[in-house]
Image (cartoon, rainbow, N blue to C red):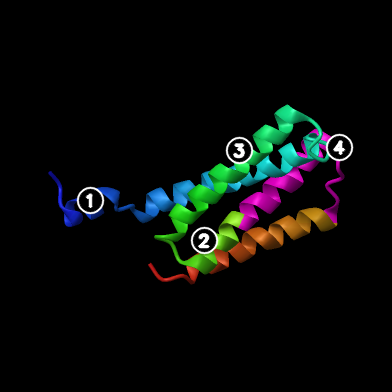
Amino acid sequence: MSGPSERARMNAMTPATAWAMLVVAGLLDVLWATGMKLSQGYTRLGWTALSLLSLAVFVFLLGRALAVLPIGAAYAAWTGIGATGTVLAGALLFSEALTPARLAGVGLIAVGIVLLHASSPG
C-alpha cells in the first residue's frame, strides 16, 4: 500500500512532460477552433462533438501543465500555438489569405513566446 509521499512521487510531472502536454493542448486548441467553424454555429453534430471534446481535453491538459510550468510563459506558448495554428488552418482549409501583415503578426507571436520562455525561471 502506498502512502501520501509515494502517490506524490508517482504523480510528479517533469517540466518536459508538462511542455509536451502544453503543445498537445495548443494543437487541440486549433482543432477546437476549426471544429467550431466546421460545425456551422453548432448545427452539425459531428463537428460540434469534435469541437467540444477538443475543448475538454485541451483544458484538462493545459491545467495539468500549468501545475508545473510558469503561468506567463506557458499560457503565452499555448495561446501562440493556438493562434498560429488557427491562422494556418484558416489558410489551408478555408482559403483565408496569408498576407504579409498576417505573417508578420504570426512572427511577432513566435518572437514573444521565445522571449517569455527564455526569461522564465527554471
Within-10-Å neighbours for mark 1: few <14, some 14–19, many 20+: few
| Residue 100 rendering spot, x and y as whole percentages | 84, 54
The residue singled out by tag 2 in the image is 74
Q: In the picture shown, does residue 71 fall above or below 96?
A: below
* Mark 4 residue type: Ser
Cα separation between marks 1 and 3: 29 Å
Mark 1 lies on residue: 7
Q: Earlier in the sequence, mark 4 or mark 2?
A: 2
Q: Position of residue 46 (x, y in %)?
A: 71, 27
* Three-letter amino acid code of the residue under disc 3: Leu
* Disc 1, SS: helix
Marks 2 and 1, how far apart in space?
Answer: 25 Å
Region in magenta: 79-100
Secondary structure beneath label 2: helix
Task: List the residue tagged with mark 3.
Answer: 53
Q: CA distance from mark 4 to mark 2?
A: 30 Å
Which residue is located at x 56 percent, y 61 percent? 75
